[in-house]
Amino acid sequence: MGVNRNVSGQFTVALEDIAACRRGDRAALDRIYPLVYEELRRVARSHLSRERPGHTLQPTALVNEVYLRLCAQHDADWSSRAYVFGLAATMMRRILVNHARDSAAKKRGAGVTMLTLSDADGLAIVDAHDSVDVLAIHEALDALAQLDSRQARVVELKFFGGLEIDEIATLLEVSSATVRRDWTMAKLWLGRELAR
Amino acid sequence: MKTGMSPEDWHTLQSHLDVLLPLDASARQQRLDAIAAEAPQLATTLCELLATESRMPEAPDVRTVAMAFANVAAGEVLGPFVLDTLLGEGGSSVVYRAHRASDFSQTVAIKVLRSVSGRQFDARFRQERDILASLSHPNIARLFDGGATEDGRPYLVLEYVEGTDFVTWSREPGRSVASVIAAMIKVCDAVDYAHRRLLVHRDLKPANILIDADGEPKLLDFGVAKLLESGASSSVTQDALAPLTPAYAAPEQVSGTPVTTATDVYSLGVVLFEALCGDHPYRRGDDTAAQLLHKVSTVEPPCPSDFAASAPAGHGRVLMSQPGDLDHVVLHAMDKRPEARYASAGALADDLRAVLASQPVRARARTWRYLAARFAVRHRIGVALAGVAAMAVVAATSVALWQGYVASRERARAEKRFDEVRQLANRLLFRYADGIKSLAGSLPVQRQLVQDALGYLAGLRAEAGDDPALLVELGSAYARLGDMQGNFTEANAGDFAGAAQSYALARELLNAASERDRRPVVREALAELSLKEAHLAYQRIDHPLAERKYQESIAAWRDVVRSAPERADTRLALAAALDAFGDFLGRDGGVGKSDPAAALPLYAEARGLREKIAEVSPNLPGLQLAIYESELRDGESAWAQGRKADAVGLFERALTRIRRIAAAEPDNGYRQREVGLVLTRLVPAYEAVDRLDASISVAIEAAGITQRMLAADPGNEAMRAAVTSSAGWAARQLMRAGRFDEAAPFVATEMTVAKTRLAAAPDNIDVQATVALAHRRAGNLAYGRRDFDAAIAAHQQARAMQVKFRGSAPENDMAAALSLMHAGRAQLAAKRGADAYRTLQQAAAEMRALVSTHPTTRFKDELVGALNLLGDAALNTPKPATTASAAWREALALIDGEAARRALAASELQLREAIANKLARVQG
């Protein structure tokens, strides 16, 4: 329950599940989280496979598409939409950070084994040339969370999830002006942190 | 916190930034200067913050996102986990890093097995997984969970470990021999911990021994090799198919002999060698897997210090430089003979500790036999030298004296170890394995215990030669192994051929022991083995052998009882052997001799023995069960004699007792099975006294009990056999009452389980007979649903199987004849009168022949049924009416013959009346 397949065979998320998640229902979260994740991945991969590297791979575009695929037919309210976007933003951060970590580990040399591979004969390595140091941003963001957790969350939603200021305001239940100030302040703090 | 900033600091800074940000450059600088005048540190921080305003990007760039998603593994969802990154991929599995979907902080590694199909993902896999999940040791990576993907591939959720493999780590700068040994000791202790919980790794190698950033070792994939195997096959006899890594596999893994804890000791030896000497002992760069496997079996490992000293450039870093005890330790662990290695990983750890403490190691002692042999060789050399020079004679003699001293001193030590190992093996065998014998699902663990014990005992035998007591222990161990492979009276894997081999080995050992030792313990072991051999011969329908072995066992038990008449346990054993022989001779429905009268005196003697014990020691353990055995056979005897109402009463009495015994031992699957057994005896008995409803309900209850037991113990042939029998009865009775839709699931269960049994023992006649019977059930279901063509086909299929083993046992001959009868009945219903007549005529002829040699009540009943149908069929052919009346007259004569001996049941009287009416009509 809570998860349905629509006519085109695609999974959709039920509104009541989103509502339950927002109330902190762990079981509902366990149901919809994987769906959002899978959808995010599917959307990104479909863009990649179409070899259309361009603006479509911006987090904003990805997250929007995920939302449309999962929830659009419900005409969900703003807060539900923002909530799903929030989940997607956390996932984006996770995915990018994991990738950055793996790249870093591979660069550290052959001596580091992430995990045993009893039969690791075909380890697929995609080397990355990260223009943005995602790992540094991630670590700085963790440090910022110690000082002001809402600012850190705003950065996560904006930077990793591509959410608009208004959407973030809805999700965090604060005014747009507050979000704008948080974003500005956080950018300054992070900029200084990254420069150190 | 690395920024050294507090939330309050940041709050203050922001209030300044609120003011500064809207200002233009010059106003901003003015304001900053003012702040600097009072708080220079604050102004510096504000400057830094403002200067980096544009450093933080608005969003990750496309390339970063593209790369990250290109590397997001399947993105698949497994249970509550989502896969993040592909960590590695190999022949049998794919490993991902993953996290709990709703909790990013929980990172795990997930191994998805792709070589295994969902169909084979069975309860055994789950059971192994649960055992592994119970391992909790700081140096063993945890197995958290396991399950199956949507498309049925099993996966394991493992602790995610970051670290460096053991050999690579050992070559890092700053490592010393001591630090490598210290880490290896921890590894050995962890392995020992698992061994003591009956888990063998089977695939220890550097990549499975990671050293984390703190220098702590973590063992990965503990038991996963075994788990892979358990997923790959439901048979427990496939050690040879287990995945292995050639470079670290032990010789016994290559040869396919049982894997024990000694296997892990070997692999640890190889890893230690490689870490200390800079290279693998025999792997060379261009070796193929086959070459490596060959070397594992044939090439003696070089002495580590020699190897290290001669290492050419290009090898890894060489830590070991001096010859010494470490050479002995490594070589002892890597001995080609499992029994000659360290008895445990703990013993290897002890010797490594001794090396670190510069104390004498055990490895150097080896065994006294080994030392004696070496002494002899040196002594001969000494003597040879004596021919050359007198000085040499003196030298050789003094060496010999010293060696002799060493040998005798070590002998005491070696003998002590010998006794320890022997005690351990016997504990494994008789205390632990027997202790869990009756627990549902314990067969794999039992088998591991017995195989470990066998490994130890075989090792001792290699040293001790033919010590009779050791031979008895070894013989008993093989007998136990045989039981688990295929003793149909207890938990077994249905591997009857394997059982025969094990029993033969046991026989050889026990015979050798009895030549030297005639103590009761040897004779008892032989008496017991004869009974096991008899059971196996019975199961394989080798009547002459079974008969001889049962008699041999009974004679041996009588002999034991005579020499110690005060012992109750041996008298109970004699009673059990008498019952077993009686079952073989007369049990209805069994594939024995179908001669119930011959069983009576045996059953009576067994009952007498038990009653006498009950008078003297009524509370003896096992006595209640023994009395139940007699009550059950009382019922069976009454049934065989046609005393159907008596049989019902006796079965009900046996049922009451076994229910009480079973209730007291709820974990004991065998007591539950016994309840199921009595219930199935009651099924035909109730039917015979015209209580069809009661018959149906006991059949359904029996099927329910046995199916629950099989679910708990799916690898157990004894439980599978109980299910085919009870589901068959339930289906048969429901169909008899016309309740075909209720019968259908039982028919399906019977067929499925019968085929599982056949897969485990394809050449076994008894199991083939079970499959044929399942076809009969399917045929009868089709008949009941009026699909006569399907019914005919099913019965013909059953018949085709049954004719292959005609002549093996009367019951099997009857089964083949019955298939003809059922096929004929369906042909008659399909209005194929001529076919029906021919088929039924053949059925009646075969049954007549059987009744003439085995005139049991049931065989006669079946013949009456066939003759009744034959008469009907005859009327559907152009044959004269006298053909039909001849058949019916013969049927009536049979019924009347029975009536002269006993009172007939109502159903039998009805049948008689119906046949008599038909006869009257034809004649009139």
Image (cartoon, coloured by chain):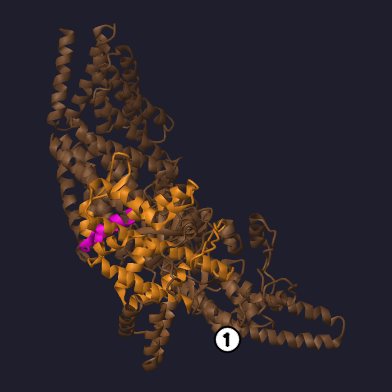
Chain colours: A orange, B brown
The verdict on residue A146 being magenta is no
The amino acid type found where label 1 is placed reads: Leu
- Point out residue B75 in the picture as x, y percentages from the top left corner: 41, 54
The reply, left or right, for residue B803 in relation to residue B317 is left
Q: Secondary structure at mark 1?
A: helix
Compared to residue B476, the image places residue A12 above or below, namely: above
The reply, left or right, for residue B153 in relation to residue B245 is left
Compared to residue B79, the image places residue B26 above or below, namely: below
Compared to residue B868, the image places residue B816 above or below, namely: below
Identify the residue under disc 1: B356
Q: Residue at x 61, y 77 (%)?
A: B172
- Point out residue B548 in the picture as x, y percentages from the top left corner: 43, 47
The verdict on residue A22 being magenta is yes
Q: Nearer the viewer, residue B448 or B137?
A: B137
- Point out residue B798 in the picture as x, y percentages from the top left corner: 37, 30
Q: Nearer the viewer, residue B785 or B517?
A: B785
* Quarter-of-image position of residue A81: bottom left
Disc 1 crowd, CA 10 A, few/some/many (<14, 14-19, 20+): some
User: What residue range appears in magenta?
Assistant: A21-35
Q: Nearer the viewer, residue B88 or B757?
A: B88
- Point out residue A23 in the picture as x, y percentages from the top left corner: 20, 62
Determine the residue located farthest toward the right in the rendered image.
Answer: B388
Res B111 seen here? yes
Q: Residue at x 18, y 9 (%)?
A: B922
Q: How many marks?
A: 1
Res B493 seen here? no
Chain letter, disc 1 residue = B
